[in-house]
Amino acid sequence: MKKSHFLFLLLTAFPSFIFAQTDTTDLFSLLGNDEETTYSTATFKTTRLMNGHSVENQAAGVLDFRINHRFGNVNGGVYEWFGLDQANVKIGFDYGITKWLMVGLGHTNVDKTYDGFVKAKLLRQSTGKKNMPVSVTYVASSAATTLRWVDPSRRNYPSSRFSYTHQILVARKFSNATSIQIMPALVHRNLIDSLKFKNDVFVIGIGGRQKITQRVSVNAEYYYVLPSQINPIYDNSFSLGFDIETGGHVFQLHLTNSRGMTDPQFMTQTQGKWLKGDIRIGFNISRVFTVRQRK
Amino acid sequence: MKVKLVVFASLFLIASAFTFKADGLKYLTKNGKVSFFSTTGLEDIAAENNKASSVLDSKSGKIVIEVLINSFRFKKALMEEHFNENYMESTKYPKAKFDGKIDNLNDVNFSKDGTYKTNISGNLTIKDKTNQVKTSGTLTIKGGKLNGLTKFKIVLADYNVVIPSVVKDKIDKEMEITADLNYEPMK
């Protein structure tokens, strides 16, 4: 009898126990916490570090009009207006075909070179359901100089004008402000100055950015050419600068020892030496236009 | 005696289960629509989030809403990037929350189909800044399902959203927020 009394009590108390519980339940806990994958975005402010590519792609349907400008060496003194008397320009158009694929075309007056590239995102850094520590992008570009042949009397092949570059960009956004990128590259030149040098040149680049305000970051970029591959008159490319973002524009202001702005030029034909003061002031301007609107 | 007890107990259980169902029914959505809009004539700022989750408790009138900031979709990709990176800092403040209630709960009959005008008040938290919000909306009940609809304006500065002077002509100081939530009864 005592047992059933207890049972009775338990049974009747049970529903009210549920009531008491529901009244104090935090409704937010009922929303559930479906874990989603959060992809890192804006590892860099724009698709270029300074001279080279960053892991950023232009969004699908967005056209990016880019003007790159490098002045002369600042050690030219007053006569050269600290380099401002010279102009090396590259004008280019980039376009995002899908969110992972972009293409671009450009032309520069440095060796009258045309270039084009294809850039594909292979991996995206993410946390949550899918965890990926880095973003990985592949870039293939080709450049063709259209200068008149130095020696028209010999047999010149059109293929001699071309160079090709393959790059794997591996980047990690460590925090909202800090991103680091490593970019091994292979440059193939069809024509080289002398047989002493290599047609295939291996280069390792490293770059990064540190935001100093929400819209301004400091960037650095260095390309190390593995030894005994290129003419020793050439040096490694190093650039240091700022990214300044205002709405649809990104301004990149920097100091660099590279004159050329296409991949084979700054990776394998950088003539300036920082320590000698062969430093150029340069800027890139990027303006994006949404050509195809998202639904 | 034992039979009596069992019958009594079962009756009580059934009865309480019913009361529980009629009184304390909660409604849930995980794909509610929350959007915002502002215009200065120069530029429209508009985005939509179709992944808002919300619970409405018909007994207490309490409503909670949660949205992930990085689930807002803009027509322009760059705007979306700037929204997350510069304005909302969505990695630092991933969620916005509303914790409020229907003030005129007695005017709503959850067991009768119809459209009811509601007064809603509560706390809205964006970027860890919480402000009181008072608004009106409608609650439409049809076949046991609910639709809650409300529109209200917020001042961006109240939520620590800073508009730099270079773009102040393009971004209005106020945003109109719309929540359109289709709830289903919770099991």
Image: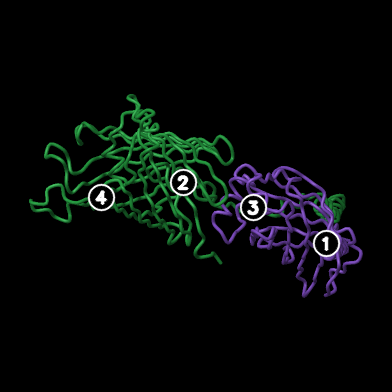
Instruction: Please say if the residues under marks 2 and 4 sit with CB atoms less than 8 Å apart.
Output: no
- Of residues A223 and B35, which is closer to you in this image? A223
Looking at the picture, does residue A182 appear above or below residue A106?
Answer: above
What colour has chain A? green
Between the C-alphas of marks 2 and 3, the distance is 20 Å
Q: Which residue is mark 4?
A: A164
Q: Residue at x 16, y 43 (%)?
A: A192
Instruction: Please say if the residues under marks 1 and 3 sit with CB atoms less than 8 Å apart.
Output: no
Q: Which residue is mark 2?
A: A132
- Of residues A35 and A249, which is closer to you in this image? A249
Amino acid type of the residue tagged 3 in the rendering: Leu
**Mark 1 surroundings within 10 Å by alpha-carbon count, few (fewer than 14), some (14 through 19), many (20 or more):** many
The answer to whether any part of residue A7 appears in the image is: no
Amino acid type of the residue tagged 2 in the rendering: Met
What colour has chain B? purple
Residue B30 coordinates in the image, percent (x, y): 67, 60
Is the residue at mark 1 from the same chain as the one at mark 3?
yes
Horizontal placement of B172 versus A235: left or right?
A: right
Q: Which residue is mark 1?
A: B58
Q: Secondary structure at mark 4?
A: strand
Between the C-alphas of marks 2 and 4, the distance is 30 Å
Amino acid type of the residue tagged 1 in the rendering: Ser
The answer to whether any part of residue B54 appears in the image is: yes
The quarter holding residue A234 reads top left
Residue A187 coordinates in the image, percent (x, y): 25, 45
